[in-house]
Amino acid sequence: MTHQSFRHQKMVYVREIEHAGKKFFSYTFKKDKDLFARMLQFPQLKYLKNEKLLISSADPYILEYLELNNNGEFRIVRSGLYDREVRQVSHSIGNNVEKVEIPKFNLAYKAELKRIKYEERDYFMLVTDHALYLKEVLRDLDSVVFHRKFAAFLLPFSEKYLLTILEACKGKIQILIHQTVKLQSLYVHSRFWLQTYSVEISFDNEYLSHLKSRNRSMSTIQNYFNSFLQFCYFCQKKNIDKKELDGTQVNKLVLELSTRNKYGISMRHSLINAVLYYYKNVLGRFDYKNGIIRPKKDKELPHVLSKEVVQAILRNCENLKHRTMLSLTYASGLRVGEVLKLKVSDIDSKRMLITVRGGKGKKDRIVMLSEKILVLLRDYFKQYRPSHYLFEGQYGGVYSEASLRKVLNNACIKAKLLERPTLHWLRHSFATHLLEAGTDIRYIQQLLGHASTKTTEIYTHVSNKHIGMIKSPLDHLDI
């Protein structure tokens, strides 16, 4: 079956019900006479006319039979069985079962790894408030030198050498990576992610290499890594070889792990995605997808702030740089990562456009430049003189997302807001306020950079000229 035909399969949803004191599988789908007639051809299925129910015995093998013998005409969706599975797992493991947590060191000391140029040479630099302790930890490493001018430790600019540092510091002091450091080696990255764990975990490095080959972002790779690491540790703790598991066994382990740790819907999906990626892409076992039951995602409405609340937040952000960053996030509906990656050259004041490069899905797009943002940017540029990135951190490089979150939180406190919005709420508010002002939904979809096939086809008919003519909602605020 081709990928294209799979996308257009008819969906048959199955859930477990009780009828006449017995358990059955019930099958539902969109009204379709041909599909209904096709389902009745399977001897395992029976239609109860009075109850208007299409049922079968509650036997998982029946679901497999239907999938193997429907010639690609429909797809069995098991998400409705998830709650039943969770209840069964909860009952089997009991109520007082402990969480499955990877043991960690209790590290009281921390150091930060930075990059510095000194006397025309690049170095890594370790900064800490516990210099005497770190000096004792690193005393056997001749290449590490404490520099009084920087009150920090200088070490060779070699990622391989960082492995030596991590080994010396393991269990004693945690090393954090500053935003000025961009590591190239995924293996070295993974050693930083693993440094706080007090046990060795069997992990396939091919997993990370495969993710990188698919051009996944570093944040996505780290999220997959953390979720899959939990699964690896769980298998290791149970003395199970994960490569020998079939789809049903993987499903049971994922269910037990997520139930023990009381994961929410999003965390469960993250775990499933990470585990499935291993079996499908690394091991090439594409049949595992139908063996893992996914929970249904809650359909939550996006959080939207009123124009008055947005105005209050921006007015209570006194620092020019911080105010400009939050204003730009709302004015153009950018994702936080897109704001932080903007370069000075991405601002086109003549055409009143901003070029967003490498957004979600590695796609570029054009958004409008607000007149009020342009005024803020000119004042900001005169004061801060950014050289590369539009908003640079204290030591150069990309500004920290965590710092921008604190900026928003502090502005909300000063504005005496009861709720604590996230940066993404500004993006939701941008889209909603444009829609309320009568902006065509097609333009809004393009401005947001949504990646679905349906909306992408519409975006191709929208010109950049129209985007430059759209007024940002920020222009209607008195800030």
Image (cartoon, grey):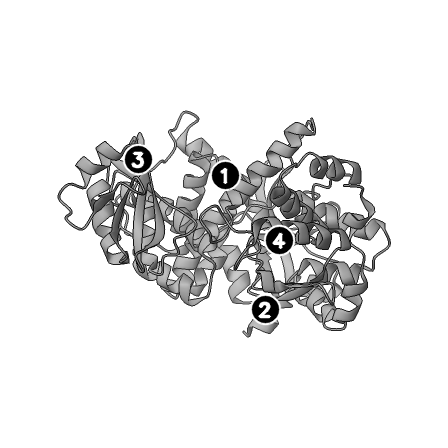
Residue type at mark 3 is Lys
**Under tag 2, what secondary structure?**
helix
What quarter of the picture does the C terminus occupy? top right
Inspect the image, locate mark 4, and give the three-letter code of the amino acid beneath it. Phe
- In whole angstroms, how far apart are the C-alphas of marks 2 and 4? 52 Å
Return the residue nearer the eye: 18 or 137. 137
Q: Which residue is mark 3?
A: 104
Question: Do labels 1 and 2 touch, CB within 8 Å?
Answer: no
The disc label shown at residue 6, or none: 2
Mark seen at residue 86: 1
Give the residue at the far right of this rendering: 438
Residue 55, can we see it? no
Compared to residue 347, the image places residue 228 above or below, namely above
The x, y position of residue 349, in whole percent, is: 71, 63
The mark lying in front, picked from 4 and 1, is 4
For this view, does 403 lie left or right of residue 274?
right
Coordinates of residue 125 in the picture (x, y in percent): 31, 47
Q: Is residue 159 left or right of residue 3?
A: left
Crowding near the residue tagged with mark 2, few <14, some 14–19, many ≥20 C-alpha atoms within 10 Å: few
**Disc with the residue nearer the chain's start (3 vs 1):** 1
Q: Which residue corresponds to mark 4?
A: 381
Name the secondary structure under disc 1: helix
Reading the chain from its start, which is encountered first: label 3 or label 2? Answer: 2
Q: Residue at x 35, y 52 (%)?
A: 116
